[in-house]
Image: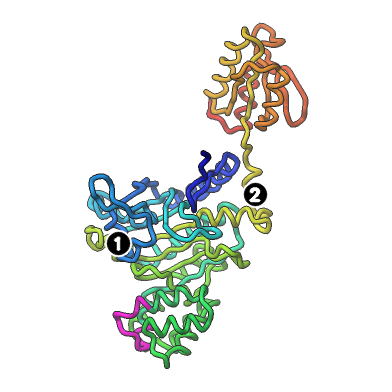
Amino acid sequence: MRFAPPRGTRDILNEECEFRRAVAEKILTTIKSYGYQEIITPGFEELQVFIEKAGEDIVDKIYAFQDKGGRDLGLRSDMTASIARYVARATQDLPKPIRLCSYDRVWRYERPRSGRSREFWQINAELFGSSSSVADAEMVACFCDCYQSVGFDDFQVHISHRRLLESILQALGVQIDRTQAVVRAIDKRAKLTPDKYKSELLRSGLPADQLERLGRFVSLKGNWADVLAQTNQAFGAEEIVAACLRELKQIMVTLESFGKGPNCKLDFSLARGFDYYTGVLCECVPTHGVAYGSLGGGGRYDDLVSVFGGGALPAVGFSIGFDRLILALTDQQQRQSFDARSAYRTGPDYYVAVLGEFGLARSIEVASLLREHGIVAEMELNNRSLRSQLDHANRIQARYVVFPGEKESDGVLIRRRDMHAGKEEMVELGALIDSAMRRSGGKDR
């Protein structure tokens, strides 16, 4: 019997593995340039970790199970919960602010669709221990830099504010205990028809006579100074609204100092449905519409660490939907700005031929020496003819083939074939190592 991967998962083979790794390394290098340190958390957590973060409803959306000891567990559905759980335990031992990043798999039991499988990858950056608007702006700047580091410039980061939205909903007459339900309805706006969206708002608790006023607010987007001025004129009498607007102004001014003004705009239709957000929100949206939606998002979540018993600790962070970013980068319209596949080869740098029984030891010596210097070298193992070895080297896309033991002078010169140019030359072993290191970025001798 032949088995396919489970529904919502797939096998990722070498060429795409190398492509994904090249992209991930660029992004992680960018995040770490801001002072973040990498963390790896368990692939599964106590089920209560996810319930505390997202509520009981999350159980239906994740892989939840009991282990053989009867413990309720769940596969990790995002990185933020696991990282916050860690920080809650370790916060007393860590200098503030704490900057942590991760690149790992997560799992959700959802209907597979374009850009989202049941098993997928995320890159996260989380900062704990600062409540300043500068921390918010730096987080958004880093978020922008991640996409730009891989040559992806066809995006805008939409920015909103959860506390501002909640305050305005309450000013519109939404009861406090219904506020989160209305926020979640707003979060569904792009996925619903106008009539269904209206029905969802009314069912969630928005007074019918406030539909038009809310509509005007969530439609505000564009030049941040104009948006803030219009919002202040309509709702600024509420002190908490005025405070949020001042905070947003400081964030936008600071983003301009970071040089990210052109990449960012205010968009008050951005709600992000998770209840734990408490402040600024952000989402990366491709400039030209694509079927797979946003490429990542985040925001401020000052209460999450305390949920896990760690005391009050402000926090802000973002998550990049890595699989969706890969789709965007491989889209033909995007590849002109970044074609990661041109930056690497999937085959080995060198294929080391074996010429007869007596050439084996010399081939092992040369292959080992290449590998010691960080050069990818694959050696013949199946005792094939020379013609078959060359055919195999072509199939695996080896850049060069070397023939140790043939036509050598005192064991110093080695015949090397350039598989792209079809040319051969005799090369001294030390020179071969030096040139191979220059091409592959191998370590110093």
Residue name at image x 69 percent, y 10 percent = 408
Which residue is outermost to the front? 1
Q: Amino acid at mark 1?
A: Ile
Query: Image quadrant of residue 310?
Result: bottom left
Which label sits on residue 51? 1
Q: Position of residue 46 (x, y in %)?
A: 28, 53
Task: Write the start and end of the magenta stretch as one range.
Answer: 169-181
Horizontal side, residue 314 vs residue 322: left or right: left
Kindly report the distance in space between the C-alpha atoms of the residues bearing marks 2 and 1. 41 Å
Is residue 64 on the magenta stretch?
Answer: no
Residue name at image x 69 percent, y 16 percent = 385
Is residue 170 on the magenta stretch?
Answer: yes
Q: Position of residue 198 (x, y in %)?
A: 47, 84
User: How many callouts does the rendering have?
Assistant: 2
Disc 2 versus disc 1: nearer the observer: 1
User: Looking at the image, is mark 2 or mark 1 earlier in the sequence?
Assistant: 1
Residue name at image x 29 percent, y 56 percent = 47
Q: Position of residue 425 (x, y in %)?
A: 74, 20
Rendered position, 215 above or below 294: below
Q: Answer yes or no: do the residues labelled 2 and 1 have beta carbons within 8 Å?
A: no
- Residue pointed to by mark 2: 339
Which residue is outermost to the bottom? 209
Q: Residues within 10 Å of mark 2 (few under 14, many from 20)?
A: some
Which label sits on residue 404? none
Label 1: which secondary element: helix
Q: Nearer the viewer, residue 302 or 252?
A: 302
Q: Nearer the viewer, residue 101 or 360?
A: 360
Residue name at image x 51 percent, y 81 percent = 220
**Residue 86 at least partly seen:** no
